[in-house]
Image (spheres, rainbow, N blue to C red):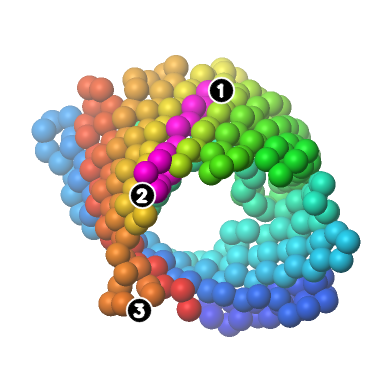
Amino acid sequence: MTRMIKATAAAALTVLSGLAFAAPSVDANIEMDTDYASKAKADGSSEKGFRQAGRVELNVAGKTEKGGFVAGRVSFLGQKGGGVATDDVWVQFGNASADLKLGRFEAADLFMVGKDTIIEDAGVSGYRNVLRGRFASDVAHAAATFNASSALSVELGVIGDNQSVAVRPVVTYSANGMVVRAGVDAGKIGPGSGGASAKRAISGLGVTVGVPVAGGTVNASVNSGKVENALGVKVKGTSVGLNGTFGNFGLGYISDKNDNTKTEHNVYTALVFQLLDTGATITPAVAYSKVSGSPTQVTGRVRVNYTF
């Protein structure tokens, strides 16, 4: 696996060096999560136990500016389970007025979750950022951004494969530390897009607002839409979120609901500490998830993050 990562990184360096006509930037970090989960069962017993996941992330990026700009980025993941994957792989070009981004990436965020070290669902699916991005490798994703001013921009996302196409326009307004976004999902996506196993219709909208409060940031978000299931039935889902991040501390709440289930309540919190004054961090976190009339799920997590 190590040889594969080195070989792939070398290839990426070559590509981005040619793209940017300058030495690309390279950085890496390791993130390791150790969890303890406890889930109550209907008979009064519980399931308890540890689990661990982690990855090493290697990032290679380059950018050149002369009149306009061209930028590219690739993020390689060496996973604890032994696999190798990519996270971001994209190229972007344009100028101060407009630009176009192509590849594998996440577009504008319509459901901001703050310090989301751990969010555990108890089984209910709402509707959050359905067409935001990082789709399967064979799915085409493009996002064109138009900047009307320093405070107002419009991003038009287009997602497609050989079976379907969808669009995601998002308007963003930002001023004095406040960020307001509103967007729409519309179209059909095929197998592999957003976890889909078959072509399905999607229609939805989202609004999120982030405001500075007491030296931190408070975010409120509402996303609602319909997603066609494997039986061809459009299921409506709604997600509502409220969270705050104040320095190294974060606290949040999410409510998820769809036509087939009761409402799920999620509460999560995290606090970041410096690890031995090294620049690395250790983050204990707790998440609580509950559906009315169903078992409760509680998960604790300790995340260690070190940037090389």
In what element is the residue under mark 1? Answer: strand
The quarter of the displayed image where residue 231 is located:
top right
Q: Which residue is mark 2?
A: 246
Residue 95 appears left or right of 249: right
Q: Which amino acid does the dot numbered 3 rest on?
A: Thr
Relative to 183, say whether 216 is above or below. Answer: below
Query: Secondary structure of the magenta portion, mostly?
Result: strand
CA distance for labels 2 and 1: 31 Å
Indicate which disc, 1 or 3, sits on the residue closer to the N terminus: 1
Kind of residue at badge 1: Gly
Give the residue type at disc 2. Answer: Phe
Sequence order check, earlier mark of 2 and 3: 2
Residue 11 falls within the magenta-colored stretch: no
Q: Residue at x 33, y 28 (%)?
A: 264
Residue sitting at x 69%, y 26%: 186
Magenta span of residues: 213-224
248 or 176: nearer the eye? Answer: 176
> Residue furthest toward the left?
44
Residue 82 shows in this picture: no
Residue appearing at x 66%, y 65% in the figure: 74
Residue 96 visible to an observer of this rendering = yes
**Callout count:** 3
Q: Disc 1 designates what residue?
A: 225
